[in-house]
Amino acid sequence: MDDLDRAIIDRLQTGFPVCERPFLVAAQMLGTSEDDIIMRIDRLLQSGTLTRFGPLFQVERMGGALTLAAMRVSADRFDATAACVNAMPEVAHNYEREHPLNMWFVLATETPEAMQDVVDRIEARTGLPVLTFPKEREYFVGLDLKTLR
Amino acid sequence: MSAIDRSIVEKLQGGLPLTPRPYAAVAESIGVDPEVVLARIGAMLADGRIRRIGVVPNHYELGWRANGMSVWDVDDAEVDALGARVGALPAVTHCYRRPRRLPEWRYNLFAMVHGRDRDEVAAHVAEIAGILGAAAVAHDVLFSTRILKKTGFRLAAA
């Protein structure tokens, strides 16, 4: 990763242009060519330095619902349970954490009514109880973390 | 959500195409004029359905190797005022109030903390403890050990 890659990561996390040639606009801002920006974003996605490129949606504003959820999964069943949970399109993120409740994931549904059904399906497929922690109040959601030098 | 907006969201949820005219590519695939796609995305940004457009880095790859979900059992009467102060700390990237699930889970304030290593996270957790003072009667820090999935929101197949 060179300085231009770092600049892409630090300066293009928000405000990517919405216009006919957005990569050209971004390239001019960062002092390179349109082709170079496209090639670099592609490379950073391929290498896993970027997980996504594009719009981030605010599920609740789209009429949907979000909740954090957690399960207590035994070590011998962990990978199979993770595969089962991850296969569901409603699972947006999933993290393993050091705690007896060791699997923490975010569920996103198109309607609030669909949430309970998704939780029920995860419990049925994994045979494990799911604790849900829907947001009651949002104090802060940060936009970005910069590259470290 | 209108049918056009839904089509645009479906096309974009996997990411913006890596071509010189990405919005025109989306427009062509759903059979509308490029100007319509630009206008609808602008409207979704304005009303908050799209939070932002850009690159989403893998925090681990950037050197933010330690990620701790700090969780706190805070007096219900004080949690809102204190949560706002915790959320304002630069090291806290997300801060929410969530329900307790007794007896298994006593914590009602969740603050996500990132650092280069666990010591750095621990220092930020100490800072949070200082803000919460006696209003927090217990806390824990759940470090992440693996990202199992990170794809973001997906509309179910229509």
Image (spheres, rainbow, N blue to C red):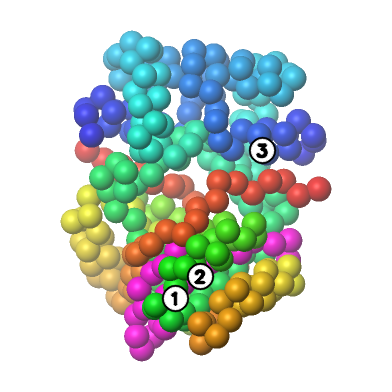
What residue type is disc 3 on? Answer: Ile
User: For the point 30% across and 20% down, which residue is it?
Assistant: B30
Tell me residue A6's x, y (percent). Answer: 73, 37
Separation of residues labelled 3 and 1 (CA atoms) = 38 Å
What residue type is disc 1 on? Answer: Glu
Please tell me how crowded label 3 is: few (under 14), some (14-19), or many (20+) other residues with Cα within 10 Å: many
Tell me residue A148's x, y (percent). Answer: 76, 49
Is B26 displayed left or right of B157 in the figure?
Answer: right
Reading the image, the residue beneath label 1 is B78
Q: What number is the disc on residue A144?
A: none
Can see residue A99? no
Q: Which residues are magenta?
A: B96-118
Does A57 lie within the magenta span? no
Reading the image, the residue beneath label 2 is B82
User: For the point 27% across and 32% down, which residue is it?
Assistant: B6
Q: Are marks 3 and 1 on the same chain?
A: no
Separation of residues labelled 1 and 2 (CA atoms) = 6 Å
User: For the point 29% across and 28% down, which residue is it?
Assistant: B5
Reading the image, the residue beneath label 3 is A9
What residue type is disc 2 on? Answer: Leu
Q: Quadrant of residue B31?
A: top left
Q: Is the Cβ of the residue at disc 1 closer than 8 Å to that at disc 2?
A: yes
User: For the point 34% across and 46% down, which residue is it?
Assistant: A59
Provide the secondary structure element on which disc 1 rests.
loop
Q: In the depicted view, which residue is nearer to us: B10 or A64?
A: A64
